[in-house]
Image (spheres, grey):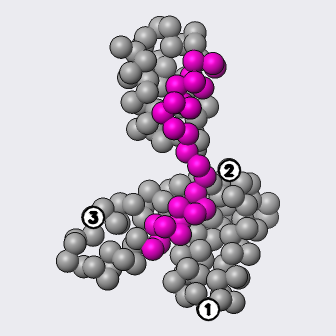
Amino acid sequence: MTFETLHKDMVAAMKARDKERKNVISTLIADVKKAAIDAGNREDIPEALVDQVILKSKKTAREQLDTCPDERAELKAEYQFAYDVICEYAPKMMSGDEIRSFLNANFADVLATKNKGQIMKAIMPALKGKADGKEINAVVAELCR
């Protein structure tokens, strides 16, 4: 996801007078700008940084949704809407089968050791931002059996 795409979608939401959607996207933009400043990339914001911030926002929105009490239906609906909008921009994550085939193709030598800690240490940098850590952990545990 590029920063320009986020900005164009925010402008489109403003023109459509969709205040809730605009608020969610503008929050994403603010988070991306803050992360870019912290990383020292004020001008040319890389896609990897945008994706990283979106994934973090998605996780935060999921936690808000999960911890919201059921009797607060209006608030829960607001959190659900924000989560759905963020999911539209989040990069697609690899499935368990895709992770398994990627590991067998690229890390067969490390998998042969059956040392889960060593395997995770080797593969996490390669799959960062492409797959969910819990899913990776489950696949590696299965392969180590």
Percent across and percent down for residue 25 are 59, 74
Q: Residue furthest left?
A: 71
Range covered by the magenta-colored residues: 81-106
Tell which circle, 1 or 2, labels the residue nearer the N-terminal end.
1
Residue 92, can we see it?
yes
Check disc 2 and report the residue beneath it: 48
In terms of secondary structure, where does tag 2 sit?
helix
Q: In front: mark 1 or mark 2?
A: 1
Q: Which residue is drawn at 27% across and 79% down?
A: 73
Tell which circle, 3 or 2, labels the residue nearer the N-terminal end.
2
Q: Was residue 53 drawn as part of the magenta stretch in this picture?
A: no
Check disc 3 and report the residue beneath it: 67
Q: Was residue 103 drawn as part of the magenta stretch in this picture?
A: yes
Relative horizontal placement of residue 6, taking residue 130 as reference (left or right)? right
In terms of secondary structure, where does tag 1 sit?
loop
Check disc 1 and report the residue beneath it: 17
Mark 1 → mark 2, Cα distance in angstroms: 30 Å
Residue 30, relative to residue 121: is it above or below?
A: below
Q: Residue furthest front?
A: 97
Indicate the amino acid at tag 2.
Answer: Ala
Mark 1 → mark 3, Cα distance in angstroms: 30 Å
